[in-house]
Amino acid sequence: MTAEEAMTASETLSDVVGESVHVELPAAAAALAPHLSARAPEASAIGTLPADVVELLEAAGMFRLGLPLSLGGFEADPATLVRTAETLAHADGSAAWAAMTGNSSMFFAWLDQSVAARLLDGRPGQPVSSSFAPTGQAVEEDGGYRVSGRWSFVSGAPHATMISVGVVVVGPDGVPRTLGERPMMRWAVLPATELQVLPTWNDAAGLRGSGSHDVLAEGVFVPAERTLMPFYEPPRAGGALYRVPFFTAVRSLLVGIPLGVARRALDELTELCRHKTREMAPLVQDQDVQVRLAEAEAALRAGRSFLLDVTERTWSAVQSGVEVPLPLRTEYALAAQFATRSAVQAVNLAFETAGVSSALAGDVIQRCWRDVNVAGQHIAFSRGRWRGAGQALLGLEIDPFHL
């Protein structure tokens, strides 16, 4: 797919964003798939996406999936986000991860919209990355903050135009500000040119092409209007997408990736079994392989169906204007965790069943195995999400934020 073809697809999406974006965005992702798959080895080798691949993703609208409509984005519903990520990840997990985390412009919905428009400067599809962990410090100054810190695992850092980073706010005297009993935290939107990218990701175990390097800021002044805090402040944009609970929104961007990677691994394994032999017998006739493949297929499909069902019901609740109730948030946490775990287990099965051929450099099943296991380590899918759901199921008091 050429940049011109991708741009045409993006323009078509813009024309129908209010009607058929649910169908068109995964289709636009599918059009990119052959190119992403072909370039995956190169991305892995250099530790980031090649520049022309980033251009294709931008031209196809893959970095403005969650951006408000009023700012030129698609404001896609959560199920569309899942399906789009899944489609990209079937081609290459790293490209999908960089694309979906490059949608941090979604959180520009919490900025004054005129400020957000100035930041985008007529380029709504530009890649915006983030690191929400508050590992930086923002010292209050007149009109804004002086930001310093180091942030890890900033996916897409080499090609992002802006990066939102988490900071703890401190006064001019160095005393941390508080909000209730907690330290006051904010996100600061910095131009990528104000940050130094530290090459920490080149030898990562998986998602190597996602460019998830560290970034460093030293005394960068950030105007107050370019800071936000979705946890505690209402969105400035009016779309229903920005009323989705925070971790539900974040997982909607990411959870399709392990599903897509697992789908690719099982597809590759099925094809491999048709022509591979083991101990002088066709692998396709191995009864243990047949049973385990069937179990993995069933679990992956069950996890995906559960996730999409709860995602749709959550979206219906949000669109109706009600706060998503705790039982439904609990269900979503269960569904996202189960879908991710099922995906990881499916790829592990594919890697084990494929045998020594998956140990070779460049093997697709090996890449899927590395990618899905790294994706599963993200905080959005951590064991803490299981714990929060379990506490809710037991009727214990719980902060819904942890779901």
Image: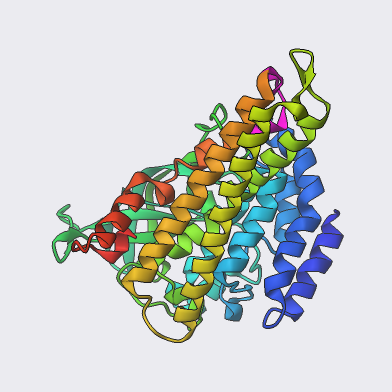
Q: Position of residue 343 (x, y in %)?
A: 56, 44
Q: Is residue 33 left or right of residue 177?
A: right
Q: Is residue 286 left or right of residue 345?
A: right
Display coloring = rainbow
284 magenta-colored: no
Residue 363 magenta-highlighted: yes
In this view, the residue in front, 381 or 115, is: 381
Which span of residues is magenta-colored? 356-370
- Residue at 80%, 67% in the rendered image: 9
Q: Position of residue 400 (x, y in %)?
A: 29, 65
Residue 245 visible in the displayed image: yes
Question: Which quadrant of the figure contains the C terminus?
Answer: bottom left
Residue, far bottom: 320
Q: Nearer the viewer, residue 34 or 189?
A: 34
Instruction: Give the residue displayed 42% in from the left and 67% down from the top.
Output: 226
Residue 323 shown left or right of residue 285 in the figure: left
Tell me the residue at 32%/54% (across/down): 167
Seen as rendered, the residue at the extreme top is 279
The kind of secondary structure the magenta stretch mainly shows is: helix
Instruction: Examine the rendered structure and indicate whether residue 10 appears above or below residue 348.
Output: below
Pick whichever, 258 or 250, lies toward us: 258
Q: Residue at position x 59%, y 60% from top?
A: 82
x then y, percent, for residue 324: 38, 75
- Depth order, front residue of 8/318: 318
Residue 26 drawn above or below residue 1: below
Where residue 15 sits, quadrant-wise, is bottom right
Q: Can you give x and y, in whole percent of width and height, for residue 231 in the image? A: 33, 67
Q: Is residue 100 above or below residue 44?
A: below
Kindly tell me whether residue 369 is visible in this rendering: no
